[in-house]
Image: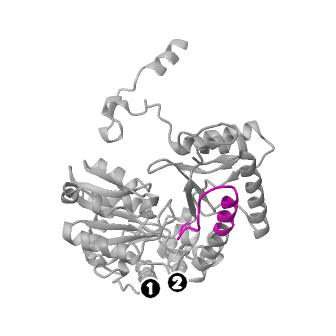
Amino acid sequence: MSTATESTKTTDPYFQSLFADRIGGAGYGKGTEIYKFEKIKRAKRKALADYPDRKLLDFGIGENDAMADAKVREVMSAEVNKVENRGYADNGVIEYKEAAARFMDRHFGVKLDPATQINHCIGSKPAYAMLPACFINPGDVTMMTVPGYPVAGTHTRYYGGEVFKLPLLAENNFLPDLDAIPDDIYRRTKLMVLNYPNSPTGKTAPPEFFEKVVALAKEKEFVVVQDAAHIMLTFDGKPRSFLETPGAMDVGIEVHSMSKGYDMIGWRMGFVCGHERIVSAFADVKDNSDSGQFIATQKAAAAALDDDSIPEQIRAKYKRRMEKLVAVLKECGFQCEMPGGTYFLYTKAPTGTKGGETFAAAEDATRHLIENFGIVTVPWDDAGAFLRFSVTYVAETEAQEDELMQQTKQRLGDAGLVWA
Protein backbone atom coordinates (compact mmCIF):
# COMPACT_ATOMS: atom_id res chain seq x y z
CA MET A 1 0.00 0.00 0.00
CA SER A 2 2.78 2.40 0.94
CA THR A 3 4.62 1.58 -2.31
CA ALA A 4 1.61 2.59 -4.38
CA THR A 5 1.26 5.84 -2.47
CA GLU A 6 4.92 6.71 -2.99
CA SER A 7 4.60 5.87 -6.69
CA THR A 8 1.64 8.20 -7.03
CA LYS A 9 3.63 11.00 -5.46
CA THR A 10 6.68 10.61 -7.70
CA THR A 11 5.28 9.51 -11.06
CA ASP A 12 3.77 12.02 -13.46
CA PRO A 13 0.45 11.15 -15.10
CA TYR A 14 0.77 9.96 -18.70
CA PHE A 15 -0.66 13.27 -19.97
CA GLN A 16 1.91 15.47 -18.19
CA SER A 17 3.78 16.05 -21.47
CA LEU A 18 0.53 16.93 -23.25
CA PHE A 19 -0.16 20.22 -21.46
CA ALA A 20 0.03 23.20 -23.82
CA ASP A 21 3.09 25.40 -23.70
CA ARG A 22 0.85 28.41 -23.05
CA ILE A 23 0.14 27.17 -19.51
CA GLY A 24 3.59 25.73 -18.83
CA GLY A 25 3.83 22.61 -20.99
CA ALA A 26 5.32 19.53 -19.34
CA GLY A 27 6.22 21.64 -16.31
CA TYR A 28 2.59 22.55 -15.56
CA GLY A 29 1.70 22.06 -11.89
CA LYS A 30 5.31 21.72 -10.80
CA GLY A 31 6.14 25.36 -10.19
CA THR A 32 6.86 26.61 -6.69
CA GLU A 33 6.00 30.28 -7.25
CA ILE A 34 3.15 31.44 -5.03
CA TYR A 35 0.49 33.73 -6.49
CA LYS A 36 0.27 37.14 -4.79
CA PHE A 37 -3.26 36.70 -3.53
CA GLU A 38 -2.45 33.24 -2.17
CA LYS A 39 0.36 34.83 -0.15
CA ILE A 40 -2.15 37.31 1.25
CA LYS A 41 -4.52 34.47 2.17
CA ARG A 42 -1.71 32.65 3.96
CA ALA A 43 -0.74 35.79 5.86
CA LYS A 44 -4.37 36.29 6.88
CA ARG A 45 -4.59 32.71 8.14
CA LYS A 46 -1.41 33.22 10.17
CA ALA A 47 -2.72 36.47 11.64
CA LEU A 48 -5.98 34.83 12.67
CA ALA A 49 -4.12 31.89 14.22
CA ASP A 50 -1.63 34.09 16.10
CA TYR A 51 -4.22 36.64 17.27
CA PRO A 52 -7.61 34.86 17.37
CA ASP A 53 -9.25 37.69 19.35
CA ARG A 54 -8.11 40.46 17.00
CA LYS A 55 -10.44 41.45 14.18
CA LEU A 56 -8.91 41.73 10.71
CA LEU A 57 -9.33 45.16 9.14
CA ASP A 58 -9.68 43.97 5.57
CA PHE A 59 -8.92 46.62 2.94
CA GLY A 60 -7.91 43.95 0.44
CA ILE A 61 -11.39 42.96 -0.74
CA GLY A 62 -11.78 43.77 -4.42
CA GLU A 63 -15.53 43.45 -4.73
CA ASN A 64 -18.64 45.33 -3.63
CA ASP A 65 -19.77 44.63 -0.08
CA ALA A 66 -23.53 44.95 -0.68
CA MET A 67 -26.19 42.94 -2.46
CA ALA A 68 -27.79 44.17 -5.67
CA ASP A 69 -30.58 46.70 -5.17
CA ALA A 70 -33.88 45.24 -3.93
CA LYS A 71 -35.70 46.51 -7.05
CA VAL A 72 -33.29 44.59 -9.28
CA ARG A 73 -33.73 41.44 -7.21
CA GLU A 74 -37.49 41.80 -7.48
CA VAL A 75 -37.27 41.88 -11.28
CA MET A 76 -35.02 38.83 -11.20
CA SER A 77 -37.49 37.01 -8.97
CA ALA A 78 -40.31 37.68 -11.43
CA GLU A 79 -38.32 36.88 -14.57
CA VAL A 80 -36.83 33.64 -13.26
CA ASN A 81 -40.30 32.05 -13.23
CA LYS A 82 -41.21 32.94 -16.83
CA VAL A 83 -41.05 30.03 -19.23
CA GLU A 84 -39.88 32.22 -22.10
CA ASN A 85 -36.64 32.92 -20.22
CA ARG A 86 -35.62 29.30 -19.84
CA GLY A 87 -33.56 28.83 -23.03
CA TYR A 88 -30.20 29.82 -24.47
CA ALA A 89 -29.62 33.56 -24.80
CA ASP A 90 -26.79 33.23 -27.35
CA ASN A 91 -25.68 36.78 -28.15
CA GLY A 92 -28.21 38.40 -25.86
CA VAL A 93 -31.74 39.72 -25.64
CA ILE A 94 -32.73 43.04 -27.15
CA GLU A 95 -34.11 44.34 -23.85
CA TYR A 96 -30.65 44.48 -22.30
CA LYS A 97 -29.03 45.97 -25.40
CA GLU A 98 -31.69 48.67 -25.60
CA ALA A 99 -31.22 49.50 -21.91
CA ALA A 100 -27.45 49.74 -22.50
CA ALA A 101 -28.07 52.10 -25.44
CA ARG A 102 -30.31 54.29 -23.27
CA PHE A 103 -27.64 54.27 -20.54
CA MET A 104 -24.88 55.37 -22.94
CA ASP A 105 -27.04 58.14 -24.41
CA ARG A 106 -28.32 59.39 -21.07
CA HIS A 107 -24.95 59.54 -19.28
CA PHE A 108 -22.50 60.28 -22.07
CA GLY A 109 -24.46 61.51 -25.08
CA VAL A 110 -23.20 58.48 -27.02
CA LYS A 111 -25.80 57.18 -29.44
CA LEU A 112 -25.55 53.48 -30.32
CA ASP A 113 -27.60 51.07 -32.39
CA PRO A 114 -28.52 48.35 -29.86
CA ALA A 115 -28.76 45.72 -32.59
CA THR A 116 -25.32 46.26 -34.11
CA GLN A 117 -23.15 48.31 -31.75
CA ILE A 118 -23.84 46.57 -28.42
CA ASN A 119 -23.45 42.99 -27.30
CA HIS A 120 -23.70 41.54 -23.81
CA CYS A 121 -20.94 39.61 -22.07
CA ILE A 122 -21.02 37.30 -19.06
CA GLY A 123 -19.15 39.89 -17.03
CA SER A 124 -16.29 41.93 -18.49
CA LYS A 125 -13.59 39.33 -17.77
CA PRO A 126 -14.71 36.95 -20.56
CA ALA A 127 -14.78 39.91 -22.96
CA TYR A 128 -11.07 40.52 -22.38
CA ALA A 129 -10.43 36.82 -22.86
CA MET A 130 -12.26 36.81 -26.20
CA LEU A 131 -11.20 40.08 -27.81
CA PRO A 132 -7.60 38.95 -28.55
CA ALA A 133 -9.10 36.10 -30.58
CA CYS A 134 -10.60 38.73 -32.89
CA PHE A 135 -7.25 40.36 -33.74
CA ILE A 136 -4.12 38.64 -32.46
CA ASN A 137 -1.96 36.45 -34.69
CA PRO A 138 1.53 35.19 -33.72
CA GLY A 139 3.90 38.13 -33.39
CA ASP A 140 1.18 40.76 -32.93
CA VAL A 141 1.29 43.09 -29.95
CA THR A 142 -1.24 44.11 -27.31
CA MET A 143 -0.27 47.22 -25.37
CA MET A 144 -1.47 47.18 -21.77
CA THR A 145 -1.11 49.48 -18.79
CA VAL A 146 0.60 48.13 -15.66
CA PRO A 147 -0.36 47.74 -12.95
CA GLY A 148 -3.62 46.49 -14.36
CA TYR A 149 -6.02 43.69 -15.15
CA PRO A 150 -3.99 40.99 -16.98
CA VAL A 151 -6.63 38.90 -18.78
CA ALA A 152 -6.35 40.42 -22.28
CA GLY A 153 -2.57 40.05 -22.05
CA THR A 154 -2.79 36.44 -20.95
CA HIS A 155 -4.96 35.55 -23.93
CA THR A 156 -2.79 37.59 -26.28
CA ARG A 157 0.09 35.30 -25.33
CA TYR A 158 -2.16 32.25 -25.75
CA TYR A 159 -2.53 33.22 -29.42
CA GLY A 160 1.21 33.69 -29.91
CA GLY A 161 1.15 37.45 -29.48
CA GLU A 162 3.26 39.67 -27.25
CA VAL A 163 2.36 42.13 -24.51
CA PHE A 164 4.03 45.53 -24.38
CA LYS A 165 3.69 47.04 -20.92
CA LEU A 166 2.84 50.70 -20.45
CA PRO A 167 3.90 51.60 -16.88
CA LEU A 168 1.64 53.92 -14.92
CA LEU A 169 3.97 56.17 -12.95
CA ALA A 170 3.21 58.87 -10.42
CA GLU A 171 5.44 61.33 -12.30
CA ASN A 172 3.19 60.90 -15.37
CA ASN A 173 0.03 61.30 -13.28
CA PHE A 174 -0.62 57.57 -13.78
CA LEU A 175 -1.16 57.98 -17.52
CA PRO A 176 0.94 55.93 -19.99
CA ASP A 177 3.70 57.78 -21.83
CA LEU A 178 2.47 57.30 -25.39
CA ASP A 179 5.45 59.17 -26.83
CA ALA A 180 7.91 56.67 -25.35
CA ILE A 181 6.52 53.68 -27.27
CA PRO A 182 9.01 52.49 -29.93
CA ASP A 183 7.96 52.66 -33.57
CA ASP A 184 8.52 48.92 -33.95
CA ILE A 185 5.95 48.27 -31.24
CA TYR A 186 3.44 50.58 -32.87
CA ARG A 187 3.98 48.78 -36.21
CA ARG A 188 3.11 45.42 -34.65
CA THR A 189 0.35 46.58 -32.30
CA LYS A 190 -3.18 45.35 -32.91
CA LEU A 191 -4.74 46.28 -29.55
CA MET A 192 -4.28 48.96 -26.90
CA VAL A 193 -6.09 48.15 -23.66
CA LEU A 194 -6.83 51.09 -21.37
CA ASN A 195 -8.74 51.34 -18.10
CA TYR A 196 -10.10 54.63 -16.77
CA PRO A 197 -11.12 55.27 -14.04
CA ASN A 198 -8.05 53.16 -13.50
CA SER A 199 -7.74 50.14 -11.25
CA PRO A 200 -5.75 50.20 -9.04
CA THR A 201 -4.41 53.78 -9.29
CA GLY A 202 -7.80 55.52 -9.14
CA LYS A 203 -6.74 57.95 -11.89
CA THR A 204 -9.30 59.34 -14.35
CA ALA A 205 -8.27 60.28 -17.88
CA PRO A 206 -8.69 63.86 -19.11
CA PRO A 207 -10.35 64.46 -22.50
CA GLU A 208 -7.07 65.42 -24.16
CA PHE A 209 -5.55 62.04 -23.27
CA PHE A 210 -8.37 60.17 -25.02
CA GLU A 211 -8.07 62.58 -27.96
CA LYS A 212 -4.39 61.72 -28.30
CA VAL A 213 -5.19 57.99 -28.13
CA VAL A 214 -7.75 58.33 -30.93
CA ALA A 215 -5.29 60.24 -33.12
CA LEU A 216 -2.56 57.65 -32.52
CA ALA A 217 -4.93 54.74 -33.20
CA LYS A 218 -5.77 56.22 -36.60
CA GLU A 219 -2.15 57.07 -37.41
CA LYS A 220 -0.63 53.78 -36.23
CA GLU A 221 -3.68 51.64 -37.10
CA PHE A 222 -4.54 49.76 -33.93
CA VAL A 223 -7.78 49.08 -32.05
CA VAL A 224 -8.53 50.66 -28.66
CA VAL A 225 -10.26 48.63 -25.92
CA GLN A 226 -11.32 50.83 -22.99
CA ASP A 227 -12.21 49.07 -19.73
CA ALA A 228 -14.97 51.15 -18.13
CA ALA A 229 -15.75 48.84 -15.21
CA HIS A 230 -15.46 51.65 -12.62
CA ILE A 231 -16.98 54.42 -14.74
CA MET A 232 -19.96 55.00 -12.45
CA LEU A 233 -17.58 55.34 -9.49
CA THR A 234 -16.10 58.61 -10.73
CA PHE A 235 -15.48 61.14 -7.95
CA ASP A 236 -13.75 64.09 -9.64
CA GLY A 237 -16.53 65.18 -11.96
CA LYS A 238 -18.98 63.76 -14.45
CA PRO A 239 -18.19 60.19 -15.58
CA ARG A 240 -16.54 60.22 -19.00
CA SER A 241 -16.84 57.57 -21.68
CA PHE A 242 -14.01 57.01 -24.14
CA LEU A 243 -16.69 56.89 -26.85
CA GLU A 244 -17.54 60.55 -26.12
CA THR A 245 -14.21 61.46 -27.71
CA PRO A 246 -14.54 62.66 -31.32
CA GLY A 247 -13.46 59.82 -33.60
CA ALA A 248 -13.41 57.19 -30.85
CA MET A 249 -16.21 55.22 -32.47
CA ASP A 250 -13.95 54.77 -35.51
CA VAL A 251 -11.10 53.15 -33.59
CA GLY A 252 -12.47 51.00 -30.82
CA ILE A 253 -14.88 49.79 -28.22
CA GLU A 254 -15.67 50.24 -24.57
CA VAL A 255 -16.42 47.40 -22.13
CA HIS A 256 -18.90 48.06 -19.31
CA SER A 257 -19.62 46.00 -16.22
CA MET A 258 -22.65 45.75 -13.95
CA SER A 259 -20.42 44.78 -11.03
CA LYS A 260 -18.80 47.89 -9.58
CA GLY A 261 -21.44 50.53 -10.17
CA TYR A 262 -24.49 48.33 -9.56
CA ASP A 263 -23.49 45.92 -6.76
CA MET A 264 -23.95 43.00 -9.19
CA ILE A 265 -20.56 41.31 -8.73
CA GLY A 266 -21.74 37.70 -8.87
CA TRP A 267 -24.41 38.24 -11.51
CA ARG A 268 -21.80 38.25 -14.30
CA MET A 269 -23.22 40.88 -16.63
CA GLY A 270 -21.64 43.50 -18.84
CA PHE A 271 -21.65 44.80 -22.39
CA VAL A 272 -19.28 45.63 -25.21
CA CYS A 273 -20.11 48.69 -27.30
CA GLY A 274 -18.62 50.80 -30.04
CA HIS A 275 -17.63 50.21 -33.67
CA GLU A 276 -20.14 47.79 -35.14
CA ARG A 277 -17.54 45.70 -37.02
CA ILE A 278 -15.54 45.11 -33.81
CA VAL A 279 -18.71 44.33 -31.86
CA SER A 280 -19.67 41.88 -34.63
CA ALA A 281 -16.27 40.16 -34.44
CA PHE A 282 -16.62 39.88 -30.68
CA ALA A 283 -20.12 38.43 -31.10
CA ASP A 284 -18.81 35.81 -33.53
CA VAL A 285 -16.07 34.68 -31.13
CA LYS A 286 -18.50 34.79 -28.22
CA ASP A 287 -21.01 32.67 -30.14
CA ASN A 288 -18.34 29.96 -30.24
CA SER A 289 -17.42 30.39 -26.58
CA ASP A 290 -20.68 30.53 -24.61
CA SER A 291 -24.44 30.41 -25.06
CA GLY A 292 -25.21 33.70 -23.37
CA GLN A 293 -26.12 34.79 -19.87
CA PHE A 294 -29.42 33.60 -18.36
CA ILE A 295 -32.19 35.72 -19.91
CA ALA A 296 -33.75 36.56 -16.55
CA THR A 297 -30.40 37.98 -15.44
CA GLN A 298 -30.21 40.14 -18.56
CA LYS A 299 -33.69 41.53 -17.95
CA ALA A 300 -32.91 42.30 -14.32
CA ALA A 301 -29.70 44.02 -15.43
CA ALA A 302 -31.70 46.05 -17.95
CA ALA A 303 -33.89 47.29 -15.10
CA ALA A 304 -30.76 48.26 -13.18
CA LEU A 305 -29.35 50.24 -16.10
CA ASP A 306 -32.60 52.20 -16.34
CA ASP A 307 -32.48 53.22 -12.65
CA ASP A 308 -29.88 55.95 -12.17
CA SER A 309 -30.55 56.12 -8.43
CA ILE A 310 -28.68 52.81 -7.97
CA PRO A 311 -25.20 53.91 -9.14
CA GLU A 312 -25.73 57.32 -7.52
CA GLN A 313 -26.21 55.72 -4.10
CA ILE A 314 -23.29 53.33 -4.55
CA ARG A 315 -21.01 56.15 -5.70
CA ALA A 316 -22.01 58.30 -2.71
CA LYS A 317 -21.24 55.47 -0.27
CA TYR A 318 -17.80 54.71 -1.64
CA LYS A 319 -16.92 58.40 -2.00
CA ARG A 320 -17.80 58.93 1.67
CA ARG A 321 -15.72 55.95 2.74
CA MET A 322 -12.81 57.03 0.56
CA GLU A 323 -12.75 60.52 2.05
CA LYS A 324 -12.58 59.02 5.54
CA LEU A 325 -9.80 56.61 4.58
CA VAL A 326 -7.68 59.30 2.90
CA ALA A 327 -7.93 61.47 6.01
CA VAL A 328 -6.85 58.61 8.31
CA LEU A 329 -3.96 57.49 6.12
CA LYS A 330 -2.64 61.03 5.82
CA GLU A 331 -2.64 61.35 9.61
CA CYS A 332 -0.58 58.14 9.75
CA GLY A 333 2.07 59.37 7.33
CA PHE A 334 0.88 58.00 4.00
CA GLN A 335 1.26 60.23 0.94
CA CYS A 336 -2.16 60.00 -0.64
CA GLU A 337 -5.03 62.03 -1.99
CA MET A 338 -8.61 61.44 -3.02
CA PRO A 339 -8.60 59.30 -6.20
CA GLY A 340 -10.50 60.42 -9.27
CA GLY A 341 -12.54 57.25 -9.20
CA THR A 342 -12.83 53.53 -8.30
CA TYR A 343 -13.12 52.15 -4.79
CA PHE A 344 -9.34 51.66 -4.64
CA LEU A 345 -6.75 53.93 -3.04
CA TYR A 346 -3.23 53.47 -4.44
CA THR A 347 -0.50 54.85 -2.23
CA LYS A 348 3.27 54.50 -1.83
CA ALA A 349 4.22 51.57 0.35
CA PRO A 350 6.22 52.22 3.51
CA THR A 351 9.87 51.22 3.32
CA GLY A 352 10.15 50.15 6.94
CA THR A 353 9.29 50.96 10.55
CA LYS A 354 10.73 53.12 13.31
CA GLY A 355 11.60 49.87 15.07
CA GLY A 356 14.11 48.97 12.37
CA GLU A 357 12.22 46.63 10.05
CA THR A 358 12.85 47.24 6.35
CA PHE A 359 10.63 46.37 3.40
CA ALA A 360 12.33 45.63 0.10
CA ALA A 361 9.00 45.58 -1.72
CA ALA A 362 5.35 46.44 -1.19
CA GLU A 363 4.67 42.73 -0.72
CA ASP A 364 6.88 42.75 2.40
CA ALA A 365 5.00 45.73 3.84
CA THR A 366 1.68 44.00 3.17
CA ARG A 367 2.72 40.83 4.95
CA HIS A 368 4.04 42.82 7.93
CA LEU A 369 0.80 44.78 8.30
CA ILE A 370 -1.36 41.67 8.04
CA GLU A 371 0.60 39.43 10.39
CA ASN A 372 1.50 42.00 13.03
CA PHE A 373 -1.37 44.48 12.96
CA GLY A 374 -4.27 42.69 11.29
CA ILE A 375 -4.52 45.25 8.47
CA VAL A 376 -5.04 43.73 5.03
CA THR A 377 -3.96 45.54 1.86
CA VAL A 378 -2.92 44.39 -1.62
CA PRO A 379 0.67 45.04 -2.79
CA TRP A 380 1.62 46.25 -6.25
CA ASP A 381 5.28 46.17 -7.26
CA ASP A 382 4.81 46.44 -11.04
CA ALA A 383 5.68 50.13 -11.37
CA GLY A 384 7.11 51.11 -8.00
CA ALA A 385 6.15 49.85 -4.55
CA PHE A 386 2.53 50.69 -3.77
CA LEU A 387 -0.26 49.44 -1.55
CA ARG A 388 -3.88 49.24 -2.64
CA PHE A 389 -6.55 49.93 -0.03
CA SER A 390 -10.14 49.10 -0.96
CA VAL A 391 -13.15 50.74 0.70
CA THR A 392 -15.32 47.69 0.06
CA TYR A 393 -14.90 46.51 3.65
CA VAL A 394 -18.04 45.25 5.40
CA ALA A 395 -19.75 47.95 7.49
CA GLU A 396 -23.52 48.21 7.65
CA THR A 397 -23.70 51.73 9.10
CA GLU A 398 -21.70 54.94 9.03
CA ALA A 399 -21.04 54.45 12.73
CA GLN A 400 -19.38 51.13 11.94
CA GLU A 401 -17.34 52.84 9.22
CA ASP A 402 -16.14 55.41 11.74
CA GLU A 403 -15.29 52.71 14.27
CA LEU A 404 -13.25 50.84 11.67
CA MET A 405 -11.41 54.04 10.76
CA GLN A 406 -10.59 54.65 14.41
CA GLN A 407 -9.16 51.14 14.76
CA THR A 408 -7.19 51.61 11.55
CA LYS A 409 -5.69 54.87 12.83
CA GLN A 410 -4.73 53.28 16.13
CA ARG A 411 -3.09 50.20 14.60
CA LEU A 412 -1.21 52.15 11.93
CA GLY A 413 0.01 54.47 14.64
CA ASP A 414 1.29 51.48 16.59
CA ALA A 415 3.00 50.18 13.42
CA GLY A 416 5.35 53.18 13.30
CA LEU A 417 5.73 53.12 9.54
CA VAL A 418 8.37 55.16 7.72
CA TRP A 419 8.96 56.13 4.10
CA ALA A 420 12.45 56.63 2.72
Q: What scheme was used to colour the molecule? A: one colour
User: Which residue is tagged 1?
Assistant: 102
> Picture quarter containing residue 52?
top right
- Assign the N terminus to one quadrant of the image: top right
Q: Which residue is found at the position 64% from the left and 67% from the top?
A: 322
Q: Is residue 286 left or right of residue 105?
A: left
Residue 11, x across and y down, in percent:
42, 20
Q: Residues within 10 Å of mark 2 (few under 14, many from 20)?
A: some
The three-letter code of the residue at mark 1 reads Arg
The label on residue 306 is 2
Q: Which residue is found at the position 59% from the left and 76% from the top?
A: 72
Q: Which residues are magenta?
A: 322-342
Residue 388, x across and y down, in percent:
57, 55
The three-letter code of the residue at mark 2 reads Asp
Residue 78, x across and y down, in percent:
59, 77
Q: CA distance from mark 1 to mark 2?
A: 8 Å
Q: Which residue is found at the position 47% from the left and 31% from the top?
A: 32
Q: Nearer the viewer, residue 317 or 336?
A: 336
Q: Is residue 129 left or right of residue 133?
A: right
Using the rendered image of the protein, determine whether residue 290 is visible from the camera's viewpoint: no
Q: Is residue 355 left or right of residue 208?
A: right
Closer to the chain start, of discs 1 and 2, is: 1
Residue 69, x across and y down, in percent:
63, 74
